[in-house]
Amino acid sequence: MNTANDFEALIIRWLAGEASAAELQALDEWRRLSPGNEKQCRDRQTIWNESRRLAAGSEVNVDAAWHRFQQRIQPATPAPKSISFFRRMAAIFVLAMGLAVAGWLVYRQSAPTLQVASADSVLTRSLPDGSAITLNKAARIGYPRQFRGATRRVTLEGEAFFDVKRDSSHPFVVEAGRLTITVLGTSFNVNEQQGLTEVIVATGRVRVQRGGLSAELLPGDKLRAYDSLDHFLQTKETDQLYRYYSNKQFVCDNTPLWKLAEALEKAYGRRIRIYNPTIRELRISTTFNEEPLENILAVVAQTFDIRVIKTNDDYVLE
């Protein structure tokens, strides 16, 4: 599989949920080769998702469209009696692309997309439907000025906490990396980084999809989706440290000290090192409100009878 057409066909199989584990791995490796390859996949995914949305509200006869497509590409040759699923999907995808592009242009004219970036600070925004979103540092969200159609769809790069206003007739959809996250009314955290997207549910129920994969998440569930894996990793999240940037609190519940240190590093931009394995695994259950880092580390040191050593802008717990 070396040509552009080979990978274009593989992208279609991935979007249709028909790609094998080996093909998914090959596609992931190809996506990492260049930003252009990654952009091609994301563009095709956007068109695919938009075509599905448009198709859901249309009365297009797919079989008739396929027949017309055959006549156009083979006007002098009778259509074969047996057509593979893949060829049907490829043709339908080409037809859907045209429909999606036309619909997308109309949609953009009627409801221009806003792009909001948080840069080097935490940013909170209200969305047109009354939902609230808190962007962590270096995150970006895109959404229309007004939600139209059957879904409320946004795109996310980076990390954000969503508090979604319930609307059972218009599901809220987040496109983050290769994941599609669908909710009705709930609160959850999404962290999309290169090659990994993480979803943690605070309240309600969330459905996560990628190609043919799907998972339902309940409060406390944590899902990690690596682009290089053909399955999801699902665990429980016992604390609320992931919400530190949205609620200005560090909520620990039998949390290992190394995990608190990681959250403090992200929040304050200071390196905190714990070299002793015994100290790393010490458990803490408490809540720290937003206050100077030195004060939090002083409480930690007193609680566990350990020392905090400051070197330049770094800290070492021992």
Image (tube, rainbow, N blue to C red):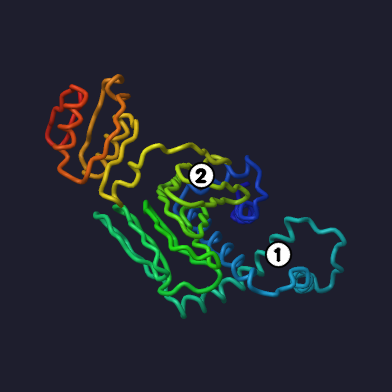
The amino acid type of the residue labelled 1 equals Ala
- Please indicate, yes or no, whether residue 123 appears anywhere in the rendered image: yes
Q: Is residue 277 left or right of residue 150?
A: left
Among the two numbered marks 2 and 1 on one chain, the one whose residue lies closer to the N terminus: 1
Q: Residues within 10 Å of mark 2 (few under 14, many from 20)?
A: many
Q: Tell me whether the residue at label 2 lies in contact with that at label 1, contact meaning CB atoms closer than 8 angstroms.
A: no
The residue nearer to you, when weighing 301 against 104, is 301
The secondary structure type at the circle numbered 2 is: loop
The residue tagged 2 is: 227
Identify whether 130 is placed above or below 39. below
The residue nearer to you, when weighing 221 against 147, is 221
The residue tagged 1 is: 91
Identify whether 267 is placed above or below 37. above
The residue nearer to you, when weighing 175 against 36, is 175
Q: Quadrant of the C terminus?
A: top left
Residue 111 in the image: x percent, y percent?
A: 44, 77
Q: Is residue 157 left or right of residue 75?
A: left
Q: In the picture, residue 90 is in which quadrant?
A: bottom right
Q: Residues within 10 Å of mark 1 (few under 14, many from 20)?
A: some
Residue 214 in the image: x percent, y percent?
A: 59, 48
Please count the marks in the image. Answer: 2
Whole-number angstrom distance, CA of label 2 to CA of label 1: 27 Å
